[in-house]
Image: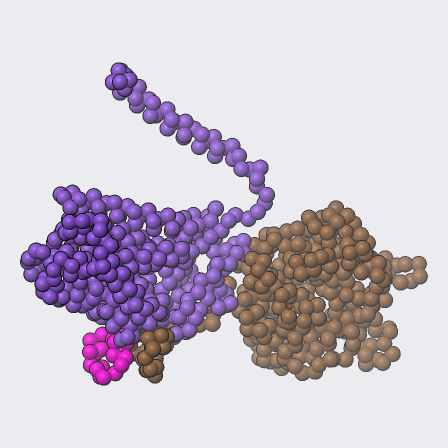
Chain colours: A purple, B brown
C-alpha cells in the first residue's frame, strides 16, 4: 500500500510540479524558435503553398469564391484568371492570407449560364490553383420565397416518407414475436446502409476540405465521439426502449436526412440539380423505410398521438434545414462534420435496436441468426441499396 | 417567375417539380432534366424569368471588357528594366577601326540569375542576359566584324547561339562556346546576312533555357553601299541605324515571349517584352506623321506559334528581314513559329488620333497578357 503511505504534498509543491514541465515546454519552444534548427535545411526552395476554395457564389456581380490558405507561410494571390483570361478582382480582406485564414475573392466576370468555367488563382511565386465551376447557375439567395420552395422539396424527401412509413404502425402492432423481430432487424439493416453511406459521403467531402482540417481523422473521430456521447446519454437512466428508443432512431435518421438535404441543396448551388420528379420519388421511396424503422420499437407500447408528429418532425425536418444550408453554398468540412456526427448517431441506434431486439427474445445470441432477423437485416440493406440506385446520379 | 406562381403550372407536365425547383432554387435545370431522364423541356433552364435577378437583363455593372486585365502594376525599377524604354533601347556596343578598314564591334553580355516580376505580383526565377528579359537588343551593320564577350555569372552552363552565318566553333552549342558558371567565351564572326535575327542560349535542356528568359534580338542593318539598285539602296539606308534616312522612322524592338510560372509545360503569362499587359497600362506613343517599323521575334516556348495582329491598319512584312522588298504586302496579321522573326512596316498618317490595339490573335495569349495599345497622335498633340 505504497500509495497510501505516500505523504500528501503541500499545494505549493504540487503546483510547482505542474509549472516546472510547463516552463520547460515554453522554454524549449522559445529556444527552438530562436535557434531555427531547420535553417541548415533551407535550400532556397519556395514555401509550400496551398489554397482551397470552400464556397462559390455566382450572381449578377460575377463570381465570388471563399479561399482558405494553408501554406507554410502567408500567401499572396497576385492575379486571377477566369477561363485563361486575367481578370480584375478584389480580395476581402486584402493583403497576404495567413495560414488557416480565409478571404473572399470577388471577380466581376460575366459568366455564362449553364456552362463551365475555370478559375485560376496565381500566387506571387507563380503557382496556380485551379477551381472548376462545373455548371454555372446563379447561387440561390436567402429569400422568403426561396426558403418556402426549398422547404417544400425538403418536406417531399424528408417529412412525407417518414410520415408514410409511420402509417404502417397500426398494421405492425398485430405482428407476433417473429414479425417484430423481422421489423427490428429490417431497421438495423436500413441503418447499416445509412451508416456506410454517410461515412462514405463524409470522407469524400472531407477530402475536398483544406488539409489543416485533417478531413479523414476529423470524420472518424467526430463519428466516434458522437456515438459515445449518445450512448452515454441514452444509458443515463437504463437502456432506451419504447418511445425513447424511437426518438433516438428519429434523431439519427434526422441527422442523416440533414446530410441528404445538404447534398440536395449543394446540388442546387453547384448547378448540378438533377432533381427531377423521378429523383424525388426515389428519395421518398428510399426514406419510407425510415418511418417503419422508427415505429419498430414502439410496437409493444401505446405512444401518445403527438409523438408521431414529433417523431416525423425530428426525423424528416432536418432535410428542410439541410437544403436551406446546402443551397447557400457551404464549406465541405462543415458538411463532413455534420455527416460524421450523424453517422455516430446511426451507430448508436443500431446498437440500441439490436440490444432491444435481443431483450425481446429468450436466447439472445441465437436470435441474431434466426431466419426472421437475418432476413430482415439483409432485406433492409437490400431495399436501401436498390432504392438508393434511384437517387444516385 | 415569382415563387407563388409555381403552383399554376400545368400539373400534367412531367417537369412540374422541375419547374417548381427552378423557381425555388433559382436554378437552371438544363443539366438536371437530362440527368433525371425526363424528356428535355425546351424551356427548362432557359426560363430566365425564374431567376430573381436576371444577369442578362442589364449589363452587369463593372463586367465590361475593361475588367479583362491584370490587377496592379509591375515594379519596373525593381526589375531593372522597363518594357516601354526597352522598345527603343538598342545595344550597339563599342566600335573600333581595324587596320583593313573594317569596323570591329564589341558587345559584352553576361548571364545572370535573377527574379523578375513578369505580371503584377508574380515573380519568376529567370535566367537573363545582362539582367533583363529579353536580353539586350544587339544591333550591328552588315559586313562588320563582331566580337561578343560572354561571361557566365549564372548557376548553370549557358551559351549564346546566334542566328546568323558563322563557323561551327562559334555556334554556341555544347563544345563550341557553351561555358560553365564563372567562365568566359568570346564569339567572333562577321555580321551577315542583314536582317532581323535573334540569339539565345543553346544549353540543354533547350526548352528550359529558352523559357527561363535567355533570348534577345540580334539585328543586322543592311549596308546601302552594297546595293546596286538606287531604290533598294534608299530602302537599305532607311534601315541603317543612325543614318539620316533612318531618323524619320519610329523603330520598336518587340520580343513575343511567355512564362510557365508553375513549370507544368504550359505558359501562365504571355507578353511582348516580358511584362504582361505592359503596353495596355502604358500605351506606346506613336507620332502619326512618321512611319513605324517593328523588329519582331517570337521566342514563346511550348506553344507552336504566336502571332501579331494590328487593329484598324495593315502593314508590309519582311520575313526574317533579309530582303529589302516585302514578303507580304498589306496584311494585318502574321504568324511566327519559335525563333521566326521579321520586320513590320506601317503608317498611321491617314488615321484619326486614338488608341489602336495590337495583340496575338490567339485569344488565349491575348487574355493572358499579350495585348497592347498604340497611342496614335500628331507630333505636337
**Which is nearer the eye, A7 or A354?**
A354
Quadrant of the image occupied by residue B169: bottom right
Looking at the image, can residue B57 be seen? no
- Looking at the image, residue B248 sits to the left or right of residue B58; the answer is right
What type of secondary structure mainly makes up the magenta span? helix
The count of marks equals 0
The C terminus of chain B - image quarter = bottom right
Residue at x 60% of width, y 72% of height: B360
In the rendered image, the vertical position of residue B343 relative to residue A206, given as above or below? below
Residue B21 drawn in magenta: yes
Q: Residue at x 18, y 53 (%)?
A: A357
Residue B190 image position (x, y, % from top left): 85, 63
Q: Position of B88 compared to A310: left or right?
A: right
Reply yes or no: does residue A283 show up in magenta. no
Camera-side residue of A42 and B230: A42
Vertical relation: B137 (above or below) A99: below
Q: Which residues are magenta?
A: B1-23
Q: Position of residue B285 (x, y in %)?
A: 61, 69
Q: Please give left or right for residue B141 compared with residue B271 in the image.
A: right
Instruction: Indicate left or right for A279 with B164 as reference.
Output: left
Residue B365: x and y in percent read 57, 69
Residue A252 vs residue A62, the one in the foreground: A252
- The answer to whether one can see residue A382 in this image is yes
Where is residue B121? Give x, y as percent. 52, 56
Q: Quadrant of residue B93?
A: bottom right
Q: Residue at x 58, y 58 (%)?
A: B263
Q: Quadrant of the N terminus of chain B?
A: bottom left
Amino acid at each position: 500500500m505504497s500509495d497510501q503511505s505516500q505523504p500528501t504534498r503541500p499545494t505549493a509543491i504540487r503546483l510547482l510540479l505542474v509549472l516546472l514541465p510547463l516552463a520547460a515546454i515554453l522554454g524549449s519552444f522559445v529556444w527552438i524558435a530562436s535557434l531555427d534548427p531547420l535553417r541548415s535545411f533551407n535550400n532556397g526552395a519556395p514555401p509550400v503553398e496551398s489554397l482551397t476554395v470552400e464556397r462559390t457564389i455566382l450572381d449578377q456581380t460575377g463570381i465570388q469564391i471563399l479561399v482558405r490558405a494553408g501554406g507554410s507561410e502567408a500567401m499572396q494571390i497576385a492575379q486571377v484568371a477566369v477561363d485563361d483570361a486575367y481578370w480584375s478582382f478584389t480580395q476581402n480582406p486584402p493583403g497576404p492570407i495567413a495560414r488557416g485564414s480565409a478571404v473572399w475573392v470577388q471577380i466581376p466576370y460575366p459568366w455564362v449560364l449553364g456552362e463551365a468555367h475555370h478559375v485560376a488563382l496565381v500566387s506571387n511565386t507563380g503557382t496556380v490553383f485551379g477551381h472548376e465551376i462545373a455548371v454555372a447557375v446563379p447561387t440561390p439567395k436567402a429569400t422568403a420565397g426561396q426558403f418556402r420552395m426549398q422547404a417544400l422539396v425538403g418536406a417531399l424527401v424528408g417529412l412525407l416518407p417518414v410520415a408514410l412509413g409511420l402509417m404502417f404502425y397500426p398494421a405492425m402492432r398485430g405482428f407476433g414475436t417473429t414479425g417484430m423481430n423481422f421489423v427490428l432487424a429490417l431497421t438495423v439493416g436500413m441503418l447499416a446502409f445509412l451508416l456506410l453511406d454517410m461515412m462514405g459521403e463524409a470522407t469524400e467531402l472531407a477530402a475536398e476540405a483544406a488539409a489543416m482540417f485533417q478531413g479523414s481523422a476529423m470524420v472518424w473521430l467526430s463519428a466516434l465521439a458522437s456515438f459515445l456521447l449518445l450512448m452515454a446519454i441514452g444509458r443515463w437512466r437504463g437502456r432506451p426502449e419504447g418511445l425513447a428508443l424511437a426518438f433516438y432512431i428519429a434523431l439519427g435518421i434526422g441527422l442523416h436526412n440533414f446530410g441528404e438535404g445538404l447534398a440536395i441543396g449543394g446540388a442546387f448551388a453547384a448547378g448540378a440539380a438533377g432533381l427531377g420528379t423521378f429523383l424525388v420519388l426515389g428519395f421518398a421511396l428510399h426514406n419510407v423505410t425510415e418511418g417503419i424503422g422508427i415505429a419498430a420499437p414502439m410496437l409493444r407500447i401505446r405512444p401518445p398521438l403527438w409523438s408521431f408528429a414529433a417523431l416525423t418532425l425530428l426525423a424528416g425536418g432536418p432535410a428542410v434545414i439541410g437544403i436551406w444550408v446546402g443551397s447557400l453554398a457551404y464549406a465541405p468540412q462543415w458538411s463532413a462534420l455534420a455527416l460524421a456526427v450523424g453517422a455516430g448517431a446511426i451507430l448508436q441506434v443500431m446498437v440500441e435496436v439490436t440490444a432491444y431486439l435481443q431483450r425481446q427474445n429468450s436466447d439472445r445470441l441465437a436470435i441474431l441468426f434466426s431466419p426472421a432477423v437475418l432476413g430482415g437485416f439483409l432485406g433492409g440493406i437490400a431495399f436501401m441499396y436498390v432504392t438508393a440506385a434511384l437517387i444516385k446520379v | 417567375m415569382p415563387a407563388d406562381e409555381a403552383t399554376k403550372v400545368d400539373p400534367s407536365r412531367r417537369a412540374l417539380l422541375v419547374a417548381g425547383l427552378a423557381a425555388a432554387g433559382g436554378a437552371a435545370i438544363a443539366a438536371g432534366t437530362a440527368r433525371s431522364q425526363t424528356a428535355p423541356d425546351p424551356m427548362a433552364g432557359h426560363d430566365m424569368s425564374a431567376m430573381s435577378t436576371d444577369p442578362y437583363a442589364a449589363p452587369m455593372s463593372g463586367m465590361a471588357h475593361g475588367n479583362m486585365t491584370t490587377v496592379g502594376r509591375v515594379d519596373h525599377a525593381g526589375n531593372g528594366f522597363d518594357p516601354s524604354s526597352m522598345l527603343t533601347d538598342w545595344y550597339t556596343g563599342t566600335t573600333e577601326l581595324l587596320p583593313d578598314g573594317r569596323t570591329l564591334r564589341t558587345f559584352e553580355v553576361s548571364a545572370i540569375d535573377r527574379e523578375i516580376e513578369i505580371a503584377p505580383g508574380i515573380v519568376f526565377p529567370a535566367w537573363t542576359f545582362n539582367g533583363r528579359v529579353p536580353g539586350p537588343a544587339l544591333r550591328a551593320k552588315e559586313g562588320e566584324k563582331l566580337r561578343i564577350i560572354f561571361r557566365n555569372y549564372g548557376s548553370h552552363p549557358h551559351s549564346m547561339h546566334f542566328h546568323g552565318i558563322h563557323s561551327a566553333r562559334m555556334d554556341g552549342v555544347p563544345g563550341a562556346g557553351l561555358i560553365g558558371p564563372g567562365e568566359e567565351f568570346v564569339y567572333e564572326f562577321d555580321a551577315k546576312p542583314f536582317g532581323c535575327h535573334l540569339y539565345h542560349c543553346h544549353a540543354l535542356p533547350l526548352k528550359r533555357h529558352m523559357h527561363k528568359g535567355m533570348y534577345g534580338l540580334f539585328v543586322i542593318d543592311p549596308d546601302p553601299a552594297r546595293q546596286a539598285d538606287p531604290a533598294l539602296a534608299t530602302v537599305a539606308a532607311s534601315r541603317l541605324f543612325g543614318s539620316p534616312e533612318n531618323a524619320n522612322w519610329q523603330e520598336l524592338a518587340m520580343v513575343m515571349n511567355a512564362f510557365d510560372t508553375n513549370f507544368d509545360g504550359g505558359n501562365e503569362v504571355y507578353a511582348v517584352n516580358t511584362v504582361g499587359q505592359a503596353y495596355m497600362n502604358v500605351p506606346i506613343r506613336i507620332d502619326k506623321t512618321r512611319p513605324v517599323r517593328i523588329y519582331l521575334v517570337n521566342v514563346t516556348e511550348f506553344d507552336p506559334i504566336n502571332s501579331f495582329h494590328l487593329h484598324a491598319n495593315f502593314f508590309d512584312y519582311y520575313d526574317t528581314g533579309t530582303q529589302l522588298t516585302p514578303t507580304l504586302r498589306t496584311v494585318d496579321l502574321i504568324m511566327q513559329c519559335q525563333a521566326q522573326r521579321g520586320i513590320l512596316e506601317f503608317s498611321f498618317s491617314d488615321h484619326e488620333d486614338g488608341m489602336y490595339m495590337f495583340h496575338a490573335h490567339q485569344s488565349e495569349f491575348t487574355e493572358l497578357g499579350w495585348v497592347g495599345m498604340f497611342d496614335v497622335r500628331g507630333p505636337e498633340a
